Image: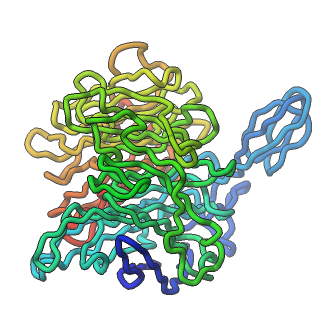
Amino acid sequence: MKTTISVSALRALSLAALLVTLSACILPSVSLEGAACDDAHPCVVAGDVCVQGLCVPGGVAEGEGEGEGEGEGEGEGEGEGEGEGEGEGEGEGEGEGEGEGEADPCNGRDPLGADVDGDCIPDIVVGAPSTAEAASVTPHTVLVPRVAIHKGAATGLYIENFVLEGNGAELANVRGRFGAAIAIDPVTYKTTGARAIFVGEPSPTERRVSGSVVAVNAGLVWWLSPFVAGDCLAGVRCIASFAGSGRTAETLAAIRANRGGTELSAAVLGMPGKLADSPPIGAVDGIVFALAPDYACIGANNPVGCAGALQRGAAFVEPADVAVTAGGPLGDRGIARIADVDGDGLDDVAIAVTGTGADTLARGVFAFSGTTIYEDSTPRPIMRWQVPAGAVNFGVSVINAGDLDKDGLDDIAIGADDAVFIAFSSNYQALRLVDSPEPAGAGFGRALARFSGGLRANRTDGLVIGLPSASDGTNTVGAIAWLPASAAFPSSGALQTTCLTRGLVAGAEFGATLRGLGPSPVAANVARARVAVGAPATATNTGAVLVVELDTTNVTACTTFAGPTIDGAAAGEHFGAALGQ
């Protein structure tokens, strides 16, 4: 069942105020299409349990403690301790003390944060942000930008379950690029296991209105909880919004931050527009700041939603904070949640200043603490990566790369034009080059994502890299390259990807966007790592998202499989231009 919400009748926006009105929208019933079990159809294999419609082996858990003896946890666990842990299943410990078992609801699968509805099967959140004009209508009539959530199923298929549409009524028919930036909340909402999403709607720098071109620098950020009912109004999905200017939310990342000692989710967004505003909302060279949902409003059964209920933190990063004088604008590219560089237990965030000038000292990638980015009135970077010699557009993409060198700590990947650099946790300040497998101009590094195949006990993780301009020798078809994690990377020299998967359609920009989806949800194919690959220029910029699977049992063989393809709906909408992070 698919639900579509159009905000065209829900809001009127000016640069000074924002009003939001919501019509009731009932949460769709959960479909059992492709499910292997439900309350009326229990699992037939002894020991299997039914988890969100999928029969899986009995639980997995990790036991922890100190001491000797045995503990009980769910699934496999290790720990030291005497006594009993919490959960179901069995675990073992040695030593003295007490042991504890922590349930793993996904039974060893890692959905890589892409599970929006809380069923342990990754979903695909797709932006189609185009503001292209339809050729057969008046100049100011445009396509409706939208964000579509395609729910993953145990069959391996994806079902379009929820669509939120932008509108054309705001700012005298000026439409923002709704869905140009998407971030999935790293914190599950309440006790549902579901995750909210942040959606950026930056306006274009200029727009045709009734035949005339007008300059516009404005935008919105939306917070949406599509799979949680009961807040705002019974049965209504929660929508909170924030109105800004200067191309607000041109870039967007979601992190676990701190407010008054309380952990909360926050969107870190870039406002790279050149329009000066009254401090502290804007700066001529762009700014970056954080927004957090106002849960008091969202949870108060508010019948009209929560207009403006994304609360901006005290902190905002401006060029002076990173000593940038000629490298901006700040916030135009490369904002991402990264590893916990400062060890405070919260996510840190990377902010790139790519620039185009020759002064590399004014550019680079800057890391900020998840604590100071929201609360500190004068945030300063905790780390900076300067532009490596010869690198162009350093920071065009940034990602938490997971544990690439298998030392137990997450690493960071930074993309540039035709190069990727890894900051390993053993020395975050140092950068290791990953060589492009293709000639210059292929766009190696323009998009990055993690991949993961297999279950916890036998998992293969790694980094997948987009090359949207790669050629097959005749046409520009795009490609993706795979870099599996390894405990035996050479101690010096450039790292090499193991294999390349090329697109098939000329000019599609296959690999322009990427999103890791964890192991295949099909039980027989769990060793296959799934990745969603955006090809937003397919079919006259209609766009498409293709799912590609890599057999991780032998990554050097580069055996890949074509998964489902999700096509865009209209020429010019650029479906797949954003896949969330």
- In the drawing, does residue 217 fall left or right of residue 517? left
Residue 93 is situated, as x and y percent measured from the top left of the image, at 83, 32
- Asked if 402 appears above or below 102 in the picture, the reply is above
Quarter where residue 543 is shown: bottom left
Residue 422 is situated, as x and y percent measured from the top left of the image, at 40, 28
- Asked if 174 appears above or below 366 in the picture, the reply is below
- The residue closer to the viewer here, 445 or 295, is 295
Residue 114 is situated, as x and y percent measured from the top left of the image, at 49, 54
Quarter where residue 387 is shown: top left
- Asked if 155 appears above or below 527 in the picture, the reply is below
Q: Is residue 500 visible?
A: no
Q: At 44% across and 73% down in the image, what residue appears? A: 162
- The residue closer to the viewer here, 217 or 22, is 217
Q: At 89% across and 42% down in the image, what residue appears? A: 84
Residue positioned most to the left: 474
- The residue closer to the viewer here, 340 or 149, is 340
Q: At 14% across and 80% down in the image, what residue appears? A: 210
Quarter where residue 359 is shown: top left
Residue 314 is situated, as x and y percent measured from the top left of the image, at 54, 51
Q: At 34% across and 32% down in the image, what residue appears? A: 364
- Asked if 44 appears above or below 172 in the picture, the reply is above
Q: Is residue 118 visible?
A: yes
- The residue closer to the viewer here, 445 or 240, is 240
- In the drawing, does residue 71 fall left or right of residue 321? right
- In the drawing, does residue 49 fall left or right of residue 89? left
